[in-house]
Structures are given as C-alpha cells and as structure tokens.
Image (cartoon, grey):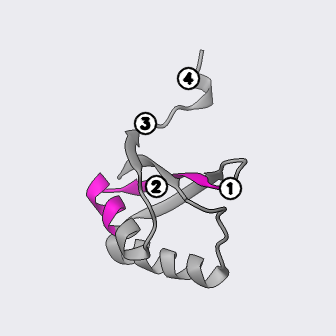
C-alpha cells in the first residue's frame, strides 16, 4: 500500500474522545485505510496524519464518513535514516 500524509485543519482547538477514536478506527478498517501516526500542531488546530491506503480516494472517503477534514492529501515515500545524507 502507498503512504499518504494528510493535513487536517480545524476551526477550533481539537479535542477527541476515546469513543470518537474507536469510531474512526472502525471506519478506517471498513474503507481499507490504516492510520500509522499523527502530529498535532502547537495551537491544536491542525493535524498531520500518516496513513497507508490503496489511493487518496479511500483516504477522502474515510475522512468524509468520519466527518473529519482532509484538506491536503499527499502521497509520500518512506526515507530510511541511513539513506539521508
């Protein structure tokens, strides 16, 4: 599967409950995407999430079903630390 970086912007500071996380995980599994890691901006209004997915369309579908923004979806390549010069 390909790797994608998703930028999500929120109007308000992000607060997410455990039940919300479980619902998002269920939707991701149903759609066929796999969340790997997320970063939260210092102002708590933006996240950057790394996912595995067959294509950007599945990322957007999962986001829509979970009622999450997916403002930017970029396919990325993995860089191994030993390959960085």
Residue lying at 36% horizontally and 75% vertically, measured from the top left: 65
Which mark identifies residue 77? 3
Residue of label 4: 83
Mark 4 or mark 3: name the one nearer the start of the chain.
Answer: 3
Judge depth for marks 3 and 1 and give the one in front. 1
Q: Which residues are magenta?
A: 44-61
Q: Of 63 and 15, which appears nearest the observer?
A: 15
Kindly report which numbered mark, 4 or 3, lies closer to the viewer in this rendering: 3
- The residue that disc 2 covers is 51
Query: Residue 78 placed where, x, y %?
Result: 48, 37
Q: Where on the picture, by quarter, is residue 67?
A: bottom left
Question: In whole angstroms, how far apart are the C-alphas of marks 4 and 2?
Answer: 22 Å
Q: Is residue 74 magenta?
A: no
Please report whichever mark, 4 or 1, sits nearer to the chain's N-terminal start: 1
N-term mark: 4 or 2: 2
Whether residue 55 appears in this view of the structure is no
């Amino acid at each position: 599967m390909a790797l994608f970086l998703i930028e999500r912007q929120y109007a308000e500071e992000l607060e997410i409950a455990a039940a919300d996380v479980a619902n998002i995980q269920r939707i991701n599994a149903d759609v066929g995407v796999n969340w790997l890691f997320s970063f939260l901006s210092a102002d708590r209004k933006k996240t950057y999430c790394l996912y595995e997915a067959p294509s950007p369309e599945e990322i957007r579908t999962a986001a829509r079903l979970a009622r999450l923004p997916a403002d930017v979806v970029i396919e990325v390549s993995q860089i191994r630390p030993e390959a960085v010069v």
